[in-house]
Structures are given as structure tokens and as C-alpha cells.
């Protein structure tokens, strides 16, 4: 077969290089954080620093407090449900199929203001902040739900957030 474009030489290292990541359904590192359920699918360690990728399930009333990341951009894709997003000074609703991009150093948060769980995928680029979830989140307990975090729990994490380049910001 003849192609109207150059075909890579299969001996070229770019063609044969391995090192990708495959995470099967049900795998990943599960953590409870601030009342939400997160599964970290890959970390910066898995992707040579390129990205961190996770899935979140946010129950009604759940979601993080307003904050900004100083070291990474963040992107969200909504799989199911509705979330209220704060992006800078703007508040808006997102739903299944919507995408939101948050540049670093931008105040943001999401909150489930609906009556059913919301499900989303999100990634950090470059990766790294997802390790905060693994280090500071709670191990899930079968048959229980993730407890909401009060101000005292956030206060205990201020140093860790600072080290990650994350600043907790006022809601308005």
C-alpha cells in the first residue's frame, strides 16, 4: 500500500518507545477529601511529570473551598450531574458534557448544589498536586460516606497546601 505521506520507520525510537500507563476500571488510589470521593488514576510520578489525572464523585453540598493553584493549570470534564463553579469573579453552572479550564493562579471552586451526586474527571498540568489527595485524604471505609471537612481540618492542612503552592481564598 502506498501512502501520500511519509510513514515512520518502525526502528525509530519514537515509534517503539514504551512507558505509557494503563489503569483499568476500578484501579487507582481512592481517597476521601472534604466530603468528596476521589480516585487518583495517575500521578506526576507515573507520567514523568506531565500530568495528574483523577475522577471525583461530589455528593450534594460537596466540593472544595475557593482556592488557587500556583504551580499547575487544572481542567475538568463533567460526566454526570450539575456543579456550580466559581472561576475568578464569575459563578456559573456546569452539567454533564461541559468542560472547564482553570489557569494557574486563578481563584476557583466547585460545589454540588443539586440533589444527586455529580461525577467529574480532572487533570493537573504539570502533574503533582494530585499527590496532595493521596497524602492528606482519608482512606475510604466500606459502607460509610466521606465526612465533610470543617474549618479545623482545612487549618491543619494550611502548611501542606502552602508547600503545594495552593492558597485558600475567600468565597467572595
Image (tube, rainbow, N blue to C red):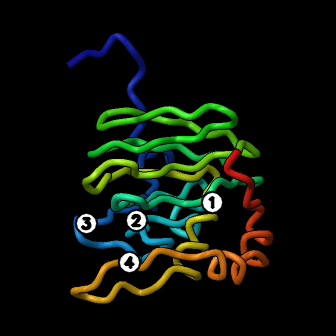
Marks 3 and 1, the one that precedes in the sequence: 3
At x 38%, y 33%, the residue is: 98
Viewer-proximal residue, 133 or 25?
133
Above or below residue 9? Residue 81 is below
Where residue 116 appears, x then y in whole percent? 25, 54
Say which of 48 and 133 sits in front: 133
Quarter of the image where one finds residue 15: top left
Left or right side of 111 for 3: left
Dot 3 corresponds to which residue? 24
Mark seen at residue 146: 4
How far across and down, in percent of the image, does residue 121 sit?
39, 51
Residue 163 is left or right of residue 144, and the answer is right
Give the residue at mark 1. Answer: 49
> Which dot, 4 or 2, sits closer to the camera?
4
Nearest to N terminus: mark 2 or mark 3: 3
Give the foreground label among 2 and 1: 2
Q: Viewer-proximal residue, 128 or 118?
A: 118
Q: Earlier in the sequence, mark 2 or mark 1?
A: 2
Residue 72, numbered label:
none
Cβ atoms at labels 4 and 3 below 8 Å apart: no
Q: Secondary structure at mark 4?
A: loop
Q: Quadrant of the C terminus?
A: top right
Q: Earlier in the sequence, mark 4 or mark 1?
A: 1
* Spatial separation of the CA atoms under disc 4 and disc 2: 19 Å
Residues packed near mark 3 inside 10 Å, few (<14), some (14 to 19) or many (20 plus): few
Considering the image in quadrants, where does the N terminus appear?
Answer: top left
Using a 10 Å C-alpha cutoff, classify the residue at mark 4 as few (fewer than 14 neighbours), some (14 to 19) or many (20 or more): many
Residue holding disc 2: 41
Disc 3 element:
loop
Amino acid at each position: 500500500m502506498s501512502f501520500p505521506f511519509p510513514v515512520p520507520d518502525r526502528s525509530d525510537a519514537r515509534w517503539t518507545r514504551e512507558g505509557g500507563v494503563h489503569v483499568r476500571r476500578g484501579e487507582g488510589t481512592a481517597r476521601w477529601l472534604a466530603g468528596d470521593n476521589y480516585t487518583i488514576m495517575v500521578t506526576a510520578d507515573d507520567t514523568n511529570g506531565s500530568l495528574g489525572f483523577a475522577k471525583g464523585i461530589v455528593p450534594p453540598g460537596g466540593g472544595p473551598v475557593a482556592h488557587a493553584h500556583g504551580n499547575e493549570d487544572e481542567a475538568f470534564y463533567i460526566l454526570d450531574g450539575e456543579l456550580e463553579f466559581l472561576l475568578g469573579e464569575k459563578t456559573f453552572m456546569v452539567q454533564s458534557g461541559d468542560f472547564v479550564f482553570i489557569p494557574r493562579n486563578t481563584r476557583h471552586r466547585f460545589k454540588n448544589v443539586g440533589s444527586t451526586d455529580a461525577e467529574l474527571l480532572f487533570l493537573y498540568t504539570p502533574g503533582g498536586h494530585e499527590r496532595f489527595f493521596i497524602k492528606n485524604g482519608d482512606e475510604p471505609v466500606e459502607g460509610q460516606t466521606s465526612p465533610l471537612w470543617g474549618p479545623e481540618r482545612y487549618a491543619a492542612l494550611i502548611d501542606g497546601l502552602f508547600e503545594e503552592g495552593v492558597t485558600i481564598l475567600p468565597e467572595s
